[in-house]
Amino acid sequence: MATDTIIEVKGLEARYGELAVLENVTFDVFKGEILVILGGSGCGKSTLLRHMSGLTEPTAGRVYIDNVDITSCDEERFQETLRKIGILFQSSALLGSMTVAENVALPIIEYTELSNSAVNNLVRMKLSMVDLQNYENFLPSEISGGMKKRAGLARSLALNPKILFLDEPTAGLDPVAAAEIDALIKHLNEQTGTTMVIVTHDLESIFGVAHRIIMLDKDKKGIIATGDPQLLKDESMDENVQHFFKREPRVAPYVLEEILDGFN
Amino acid sequence: MQAVDFYEIIDNGNDASVIKLIGNITQQTATPLIERLVFLTKTKDLKSLTVDMENVTEFDDFGALLLVELRQNILKKKGSFSLINDTREIKQILSLVNFDEHKTFKPASQKRTNGFVIRLGETFIEVADSIRFQISMVGSIILCIFHGCKKPSSIRWGDTIAHMEKVGVDALPIVSLISFLLGFIIAFMSSLQLQQFGANIYVASLVALAMASELGPIMTAIIVAGRSGSAFAAEISTMQIYEEIDALFVMGFSPTQFLVLPRLFASIIVVPLLTVFSNLFGIAGGLVIGITMLGLTPQSYIGQTFETLTLFEVVWGLFKSMIFAMLISWISCFYGFRARGGADSVGNAATSAVVSSIFFIILFDSLFAVVRSYW
Ligand SMILES: Nc1ncnc2c1ncn2[C@@H]1O[C@H](COP(=O)(O)OP(=O)(O)O)[C@@H](O)[C@H]1O
Ligand SMILES: [Mg+2]
C-alpha cells in the first residue's frame, strides 16, 4: 500500500438480500484529498459509504482504513479506527432532543478529559468553524436545512477525524446554501488537511470541490469512471459518463421526442 | 511522554511570564497541557503572559483551545496576553476557529426559565388552545360521521378493518391471559375469606360480577390504551412531523375522516368484543379455583354465575367499554395531531396519550358508578 493511501477498498460487494447493489468495487482514497463519489439516485452511493465507514459489513471484499482491515479486525481496533472517521449523514442526524451545542459537545465529553469550561470553549470554536456561533441554544427543529448540515459537520469534526465522510451534503439545499457548504468543505479540507469522501449527485458542486471523482453506475453495479472531473467531462468516451454530465435522460430517442412533443 | 515536554516557562520578573510551547500541540497532547498550564496561570499572580509559538511543529484546534483557555484566565485577572512567533499555518487555524472572538468565558446558557407570571400565562394559553383544538376535533368528528351516514362509501372501511385487526385480534391473547389471571386471583383471594363461612359458591358470584361490571371493561380498556392508544398517537404524530397530514389536507382529504374515523370505529366495534372475551376468561379463571380449591362442580359454578349476572349488568359493562374505546381513540388521535417539532415529540405524544387515556378511563368509570347509584 502506498504511504499516502488512507482508505483502500478491495473487491467490495454489497447486496440487500437477492439484490446486488455493488459488485467488485476497488479503489483507493489518498491522504488529504477530496474524493467525490458521483452517481444517480439509487446507484448505491450511500451503500458504499456505509461499507467504507464500517456501518455495514460487506458480503465480500475488504475495506482498509489506515492499514486496518475494518471488515475483519477485532472490536478494539475497530473502535480505534472509528475514532479516526467522522460522518455527516444525509439527514444530518442531529439528536432532536438536544441543542446544537449539546450535539457538538456529545463526542467531546465522551472521548476527552477536558474540563467543562474547556468543552464549552471548544464547542464554541467548532461552531465558529461552521459559522453557527449564534445558534448554540437552538434545537435542530428550529434551524434550517443548511444550518443542520453545518451543525452536523461541526459534530462530525468534533474530534478532528482524519477522514470525513459526507453523504449528499448539498442535497435539498438552495443553491446559495449549497455553495456555502461546498466552500466550507473546501476550506476545512485546506485548513485541517482532513481527507474528505463526498457522495453526491450534485454536478454543480463537484467542479469546485473535487480533487478526484469516482463515478458509479446502477446497471454496471460499480465504477464506470475515475479521475479529474474536468478531464472526465471533456474527454471521457463512456456513454454513461457523458449522459450524466450532459444531464440527458437515458431513454430511447422516440420516447424523448414524445415527452418533448407533450410540452409543445 | 510527559506534559512537561511540551512547554518551558521563562519568568521575566514583574509578574510577567513567557510560555514557550514546543512540538505537537494537537488533540493527542493538548488535554493534559490545558489542565496544567491553566492551573499554573491561575495560581501565579501574573500581569502579563506571552506565549511563544516558535518551536511548535503541529497545531490544531485543540491547540487553539489551549490558547483560548490561557487567554481567558489572564484576561479575567485583568492581565494581558500576547502571542509571538506564530506561523502562517497557526494563524490560519486560529482564524478558522475565530480565535479573536473567544476572549471572555461565556457559561453554557441554561434553558430559558421565565418568571412565574409568564409561565402561568403560557400554561393558560396552552390549555385554552388545547381545549379549543379538542372542541374543533369533536366538531370535525361529528361532521365526518354525518357525512359518512349520507355517503357510507366515503368512510375508509379497508383501514377500519385493518385497525380492527390491530386493536382487537392482535390484543386477544394478552387480554385473555391477563383476564384469566385476574379472575384466578380474585377467586383465590375471596375464597380464603368466604370459605370460613362456608359460602364457597358465592365466589362464583363475586368473580362474575366483578369481571362483568368493572374489571373486564377497565382491564381491557387499559390494555388497549397501552397497546393501541400509544400506536395511534405515534402513527399520527409521525405523520404530523413529516408533513404527511398537511399533504392529505391539501389533496382535499379531511385528516379526521382519513385518520380518526377508521381508528374510532375500529375501537368502538372491537373493544366491547374484547371485553366479552375478558369476562369469559376471567370467569374461567375463577372456575379453575372453584373446582380445584373449593370443591365445586363446573355445573354448580356456572349455574351460580348465570344466576348472579343480569343482562343489564353485562350490557352496562359493554356500554362502558364502548365509551372507553371512544375516549382512547379520541385522546390518542388528539395527542398525535398536537405533536410538533422533531422525532422526540413522537415519544412524548405516545406517553401523553397512554397516561391521559388511562386517567380518563378511570375518571369516567367513577362517573358511571355515581350515575348508577343515583339512578
Ligand atoms: N435497507 C435496504 N433494503 C433493501 N434495499 C435497499 C436498502 N437500502 C438501499 N437499498 C437499495 O439499494 C440501492 C442503492 O441504495 P442507496 O445506496 O441508498 O442509493 P443512493 O444513495 O445512491 O441513492 C437502491 O436500489 C435501493 O433500492
Ligand atoms: Mg443516498
Image: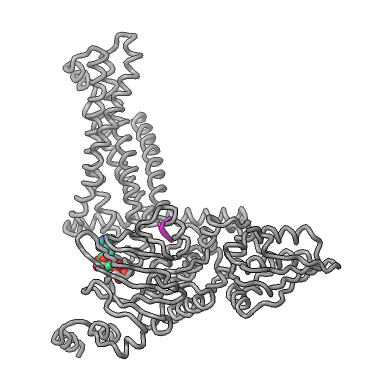
| Left or right of B182 on screen, residue A96 | right
Quadrant in which the N terminus of chain B appears: bottom right
Q: Nearer the viewer, residue B367 or A158?
A: A158
Q: Is residue A95 above or below residue A150?
A: above
Q: Quadrant of residue B235?
A: bottom left
At 36% from the left and 60% from the top, the residue drawn is: B240
Q: Which x, y percent locates residue A144?
A: 46, 71
How far across and how far down the image is residue B285, in percent?
A: 25, 24
Extent of the magenta region: B339-344
Q: Is residue B371 above or below residue B89?
A: above
Answer whether residue B114 is magenta in the image. Answer: no
Q: Main secondary structure of the magenta part?
A: loop
Q: Is residue A124 left or right of residue A93?
A: right
Q: Residue at x 44, y 72 (%)?
A: A3
Position of residue B164 relative to residue B192, above or below, is below
Q: On the picture, is B67 further left or further right than B218? A: right
Residue positioned most to the left: A254
| Total marks in image | 0
Q: How is the image coloured?
A: one colour
Q: Quadrant of residue A11?
A: bottom left
Residue B252 in sight: no
Residue A23 coordinates in the image, percent (x, y): 24, 68
Please tell me whether residue B341 belongs to the stretch shown in magenta: yes
Indicate the quadrant where residue B132 lies: bottom left
